[in-house]
Image (cartoon, helix red, strand yellow):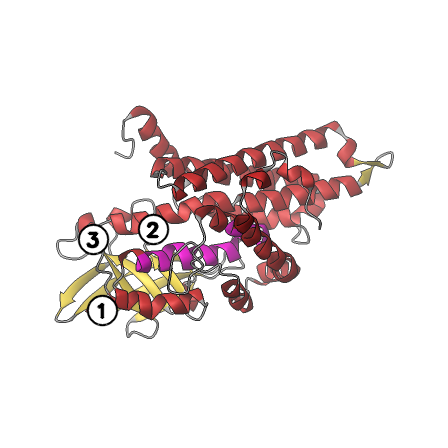
Amino acid sequence: MPRAEITDLFRIDDLLSAEEKAARDAVARFVDAEVLPIIGKHFRDGTFPAHLIPGLAELGVLGANLQGYGCAGMNTVSYGLVLQELERGDSGLRSFASVQGSLCMFPIHAFGSEEQKTRFLPGMAKGQLIGCFGLTEPDFGSNPGGMRARARKDGDSWVLNGTKAWITNGSIADAAVVWAKTDDGGPESVRGFLVEKGMPGFSAREIPGKFSLRASRTSELSFQDVRVPDRNVLPGVVGLRGPLSCLNNARAGIAFAVTGAAIACFEGAREYALSRTQFDGKSIAGYQLTQEKLADMLQEIVKAQLLSLRLARLKDEGKSNPVMVSLAKRNNVKSALDIARVARSIYGANGITDDYPPVRHMLNLESVFTYEGTHEVHTLVLGKAITGIDAFG
């Protein structure tokens, strides 16, 4: 489907460099040619399109905003635009890239030893090694400081025990960045461990019954007396600052990305409304209620585009902060989810099938609404910034 000129109503393209547009357009062509023709079947079947990984690596998508070690070294704006195009295809594919780059490659790049960076990052950038991020536990999602995973020092290695849940890429990962408490078990004792596939006691199983992110691998990780050598412990950070900095990095990309799903729903609904006739043979796009829906959708897309671009520019200038990220993630995910629901209504009964994009994006966005900080948690982050009062307790 050709892109609608109206989607760029506020001429966002005029604010982008040639390099930023080139990165976006390359991934857009990949999504149109390789993702959209097959993603509906993968969603229906509950399978991840792993055959697309080499193509993503070739485009520089994996670890795109990291410098060196085979990474593309894109700025934050380019990275956000790339993720937006992947999200236009499907949240599952974008989640794969987000986890690989922002949650697995980033902590190795930021906190790893030179030996760890050299051992893992080039292979991850090429898509030859897949990573996952082990922080969330079955009973501790929004409260990572309550985690029960423990690692105790034993000679020249650590013995790791615990369980992690809702882990994207978990069952296909070659390496997991796992966060666990050490020493006295307080939040400031948290360390990052690089757990490799095949280590005795490490297992991953798929979480069944998902109605969201079906074209993605979501797993539970189990660690039973897994012996992790000292060389696989991230030396550059101790405490919750490590995992939280990863999440903040990922959230900024997600805030930019989700507008891709909104754009897919809006442009699809617009085309459908123009071609669908009803009653007197008039296009349903000519009815006032349909036009109101389309106008509301476009309004929210433009707001999200401007918010994302400003956040990304501030991040590149070193001027962003977690409160800005929370506002962008909270606003953009909610608006994308609302747009998917409204778009579904324009399609009528056809909108509940996976022949059209809205219901797939709507179901996926229900997960994005929750992961990387729930909508409610980001609300409280903003509430604290506004009032100075911490409502977390």
Residue 246: mark:
2
Q: Please say if 33 is above or below 323.
A: below
Residue 247, position as x, y percentages in the image = 36, 48
Task: Give the residue displayed 50% in from the left and 59% down from the top.
Answer: 216
Inspect the image, locate mark 1, and give the three-letter code of the amino acid beneath it. Answer: Arg
Residue 180, position as x, y percentages in the image = 24, 57
Q: Earlier in the sequence, mark 2 or mark 1?
A: 1
Q: Please say if 386 is above or below 133.
A: above
Inspect the image, locate mark 2, and give the three-letter code of the amino acid beneath it. Answer: Cys
Inspect the image, locate mark 3, and give the three-letter code of the amino acid beneath it. Answer: Val
Residue 112: mark:
none
Task: Identify the residue position indicated by label 1 in the image.
Answer: 231
Residue 226, position as x, y percentages in the image = 25, 70
Q: Earlier in the sequence, mark 2 or mark 3?
A: 3
**Residue 173 visible here:** no
Q: Please say if 234 is above or below 328.
A: below
Foreground residue among 138 and 2: 2
**Residue 325 visible here:** yes
